[in-house]
Amino acid sequence: DDAQDLADLQAEWYPPESYPDGVPWCERLLADPGVMALKAMLPGQCDVAVGVVVALVSKSAIQEFSDQRTVDTLRSELTLPRCIPWDSPERRELAYIQSVGVIGELRRRGIAKELLQRSLAELRAKSPDLRAVALDLASYNQAAICCYEALGFKRLLERPEAYSGDGRR
């Protein structure tokens, strides 16, 4: 089941407070119409999830599944200075990549890049008014920085507190 796969992967990568209530929280997340998620599976082993990307693609999903500091940063750094509308819950001009990850032994093999490319293509196809896609990234993760920059992401702001929680993996 997708929610169980997401909860298992998130438990490997993040502290428990990042995904409160485990599977039930992941079920709510994945059921939300403002959320898009893709998972990577091992070929020939359909029951083994090895990676995931989760994007919040509506204002209501961003507000529901992000912390207030993230919402405030998106407002101050993207919607206000770039005149991206933020007036109704179903707005889809801004997306926020909440999570991207691949299990440890399969990292640096292009899986995350492929997940991101496919998710960006799906975001563009389903949200024709999309004007910006944002994400948070740990400054020490040079491999991820190179991947995101190769896909056209630009650095806007450094938020050291975004990855300062105990238990980050």
Image: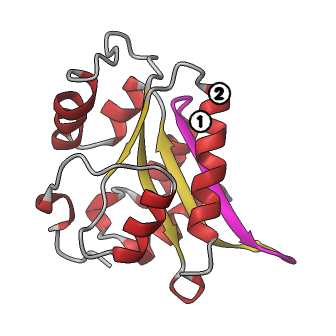
Horizontal and vertical percent position of residue 55: 49, 44
- The residue that disc 1 covers is 123
| The magenta segment | 32-44
Q: Nearer the viewer, residue 91 or 76?
A: 76
In the picture, the quarter occupied by the C terminus is bottom left
* Residue 167 falls in image quadrant: bottom left
94 relative to 37 in the view: left or right: left
Horizontal and vertical percent position of residue 54: 51, 50
Observer able to see residue 5: no
Which secondary structure lies at badge 2? Answer: helix
State how far apart marks 1 and 2 are (Cα). Answer: 5 Å
Residue type for callout 2: Lys
x 21%, y 65%: residue: 163
Number of the label disc, if any, that sits on residue 147: none
Horizontal and vertical percent position of residue 115: 62, 59
Observer able to see residue 55: yes
Is 35 contained in the magenta span? yes
Label 1–label 2 contact, CB within 8 A: yes
Neighbourhood count class around disc 1 (C-alpha, 10 Å): few under 14, some 14–19, many 20 upward: many
105 relative to 147 in the view: left or right: right
